[in-house]
């Protein structure tokens, strides 16, 4: 919809609401007049009074239904407007969260790739520099030998099955 159509639709809605409000207001004024007439005509025969009360009850139900419909409609309209705004905000938050999750996944993938490359390079360098020297563990002294960094990184990446994580 373009701007002119939206403006025309809003103007039609406003005109319709004014007509509905006018009809409801006229019904309330007529009902108030009926109440005054009932009070003024209260000194009559019981049979006549019962008929008037019966008609008054029917008119009262119609008027109160119209008023309730008008005000209920306005309350629901504001609730719908609020719900739509909340839904749009939730959609935006979900979109932002998806984008952030994608960024985190890419960052984790880069870190994982870098860690694997470092581990592989360390293994290759260790194998070239010290063939035949094995890992003495984390408690090995520096004077007695060196720590096998490749095995250490491999242990960090793939812990043994017998050790709980």
Image: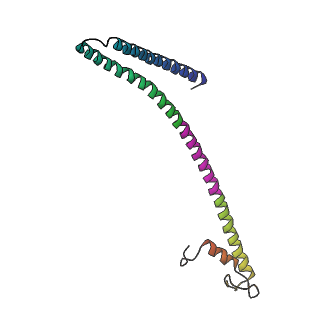
- Image coordinates for residue 151, horizontal then vertical, percent: 66, 78
Of helix, strand and loop, which mostly describes the magenta segment? helix
- Image coordinates for residue 113, horizontal then vertical, percent: 66, 64
- Image coordinates for residue 84, horizontal then vertical, percent: 53, 36
Q: Reply above or below: 133 against 90.
A: below
**Residue at x 51%, y 21% (from the top left corner):** 13
Q: Reply above or below: 52 against 109.
A: above
Residue ranking furthest to the left: 47
Res. 160 image quadrant? bottom right
Start and end of the magenta stretch? 84-106
Residue ranking furthest to the right: 143
- Image coordinates for residue 93, horizontal then vertical, percent: 59, 45
Res. 141 image quadrant? bottom right
Residue ranking furthest to the front: 43
Closer to us: 127 or 47: 47
Say which quadrant the C terminus sits in.
bottom right
**Residue at x 51%, y 31% (from the top left corner):** 78
């Amino acid at each position: 919809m373009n701007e002119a159509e939206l403006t025309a639709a809003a103007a039609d809605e406003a005109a319709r609401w004014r007509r509905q409000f006018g009809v409801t207001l006229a019904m309330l004024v007529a009902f108030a007049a009926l109440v005054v007439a009932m009070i003024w005509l209260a000194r009559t025969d019981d049979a006549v009074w019962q008929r008037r009360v019966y008609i008054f009850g029917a008119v009262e139900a119609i008027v109160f239904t119209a008023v309730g419909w008008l005000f209920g409609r306005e309350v629901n309209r504001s609730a719908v407007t609020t719900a739509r705004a909340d839904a749009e905000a939730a959609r935006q938050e979900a979109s932002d969260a998806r984008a952030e999750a994608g960024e985190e996944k890419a960052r984790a993938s880069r870190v994982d790739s870098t860690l694997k490359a470092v581990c592989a390079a360390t293994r290759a360098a260790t194998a070239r520099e010290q063939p035949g020297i094995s890992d003495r563990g984390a408690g090995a002294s520096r004077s007695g030998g060196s720590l096998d960094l490749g095995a250490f990184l491999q242990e960090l990446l793939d812990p043994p099955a017998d050790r709980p994580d």
